[in-house]
Amino acid sequence: MTAFARKWGADLVAAATSDLPWLAWTTLLATMALTAQTVFFLTRWRPDDRWWRLGAGYSMLLFFLGGAVWEGFPGAATRVLLPLNLAFNVFVHRTRAPLAWLLIGNFTVFSGLLTLNYLPNDSLEFSTRANGTSYIGRFGDGWSGREHNWRHAWTWSAGQGQVGIEAWPKRSGELRPGI
């Protein structure tokens, strides 16, 4: 419980003082959403409903998560408590709760959207999907760093360069570049 309370305090301070206001505010909204979801489950006792049981269980877990899960912006709690979010969305619909509950309980969306803008990106890696197969390619020795514009990304080699390609599902076969 103390880690959860500390998270609330840290989020409030960060929202007021952070030099990264979007990150701080979306994190505060995510913490608010998780709190609202927990309150919703703990104030509507329905042990015969499996979605309530799932949500109530994860609502209780929220109070026992350690500081490492709550640290940072937005922190790992939004991922750890993802089943709570799912159960909340199903259960709030089943109980025909007011729209405000649905909206407040889904404030985690803003944090998720902001996080998607800051995905790590390896400059010597590319991925694509074709004919039901996903590919990840890694440029090896002999390649420059990746360059890009708003539409395309590319890399170049002054001579020979190596490329390792991994595919899912795993299949053996010949890969032919399309021109």
Image: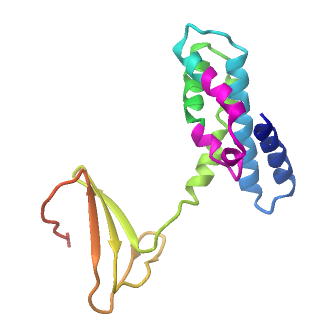
Q: Is residue 85 toward the left or the right of residue 177 in the image? A: right
Magenta-colored span: 56-80
Q: Residue at x 58, y 39 (%)?
A: 80
Q: Is residue 7 above or below residue 41?
A: below
Location of residue 24 with respect to 55 vertically, above or below: below
Which picture quadrant has residue 156? bottom left
On the image, the x and y values in percent for residue 30 come to: 69, 41
| Relative depth, front residue between 121 and 76 | 76
| Residue at left offset 70%, top offset 26% | 38
Q: Main secondary structure of the magenta part?
A: helix
Residue 58 shown in magenta: yes
Is 84 positioned to the left or the right of 3 in the image?
A: left
Q: Is residue 149 within the magenta segment?
A: no
Quarter in which the C terminus is drawn: bottom left
| Res 137 → quadrant | bottom left
Q: Residue furthest left?
A: 173
Residue 98 in view of the camera:
no
Can residue 168 be seen here?
yes
Is 54 on the left or on the right of 135, as rendered?
right
Residue 175 lies, in percent from the top left, at 17, 66
Q: Nearer the viewer, residue 75 or 110?
A: 75
Residue 69, placed above or below residue 43: below
Which quadrant does the N terminus fall into? top right
Find residue 164 and report its horizontal and vertical position in percent.
Answer: 28, 71
